[in-house]
Image (spheres, grey):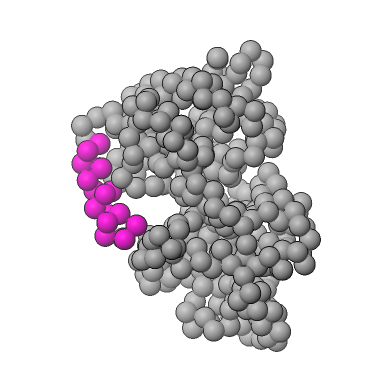
Amino acid sequence: MEVRELQEKNIWEGFLEGCSEKTFLHSWNWGEFQKAMREKVWRLGFFEGKDLCSVCLLVRVKAKRGMFVLVPHGPVLKDSIKDAQGTKREILSLLLGILKKTAQEEGASFVRINPIWERTQENVGLFKEAGFQRAPMQMHPEASWKLDISLPEDALLSSMRKTTKYLIRQAQKNPDITIEQSDNREDIQTFSKLHKLVSKRQSFTPFSYEYLEREFSLFSKEQEVTLFLGKVKGDIGAASFVLFWSGIGFYHHAVSLPQYTKLSLPYLLQWEAIKEAKRRGCKLYDFWGYVDPFKQPSHPWAGPTLFKMGFGGKAHEYVKTQDYPLKKSYWLLYAFELLRKIRRGL
């Protein structure tokens, strides 16, 4: 097997178009977004002869807690080799060699992978065998709730939880409620302010305005993102940041103000986003992060997950985030991240 750096967007995106397990974190534009955020990226292709069988995005991350090399939701595999353990073992071995070399050249203390591989005993074993260890915390979702939206709208509604369906209809009947779509930069600024307000209430670190604005700007160039605004008498009560890429709609960021809770805005907002994904030809809607609310009822994501589950769908669980330490300083970071995870109740 040979590894080559890929420079052509059409080859990269064309390969991903045919893969079933993928997220926008491996899209070409996500790499461009990382560059806009002053990070370095490498796009690798794994070839068997002339056959491209896997792609992998590497991102050098400069963080306050130290520099590292990240693989976000990758490597992405061609469907025909998803269960080929020998081929996956070879890809992982080659990738680790490149990751270690890149990390050393960049002065990074470790490498981190958020795999997009199904969480099976065999896949977990491949990472353990290669010398990886479980990371103290995740960078991106390790599990997601996904809905097949290829069915007609009536069928999607009938498959929803009874309460979810009722709340959508109640919001639809309310003359004070409107759902709008926006690509206005001023609305991104408003979303960012609301995001900060909600983060204080829910005790999480918000994304900066620069992060949100650059993500929106890059994906909007190809009309791959929309800001949904749920308004009550003209005032924004809920909003969501939805990406549309490679036949999938992604519910990436969202805010909801507590004073409008009784009006069920998020339910109608979500339904409108799902319908827009269908209009754009998407076959799948990815609600993003998921935890099992019955096994982890006190987890901060338990409530949001129950909300997502009401629309129908099923859970997809990936191999948990993996680290490969390269310097002793990694262990200070490990202790810091583990403590932060405990404090947040994650």
Segment colored magenta: 330-346
Compared across the picture, whether 233 is left or right of 345 comes to right
Quadrant position of the C terminus in the picture:
bottom left
From the viewer's side, name the closer residue of 16 and 143.
Answer: 143
From the viewer's side, name the closer residue of 118 and 55.
Answer: 118
The answer to whether residue 223 shows anywhere in this view is: no
Quadrant position of the N terminus in the picture:
top right
Q: Is residue 231 magenta?
A: no
Q: Main secondary structure of the magenta part?
A: helix
Residue found 26% across the figure and 49% down from its top: 338
Q: Is residue 186 above or below residue 46?
A: below
Residue found 24% across the figure and 53% down from its top: 339
Q: Is residue 339 magenta?
A: yes
Compared across the picture, whether 298 is left or right of 30 comes to left
Q: Is residue 148 above or below residue 88?
A: below
The answer to whether residue 273 shows anywhere in this view is: yes
Residue found 22% across the figure and 45% down from its top: 335
Residue 154, image x, y percentages? 77, 67
Residue 65, image x, y percentages? 28, 44
Compared across the picture, whether 323 is left or right of 143 comes to left
Residue found 55% across the figure and 77% down from its top: 237
Residue 310 placement: quadrant? bottom right
Residue 269 placement: quadrant? bottom right
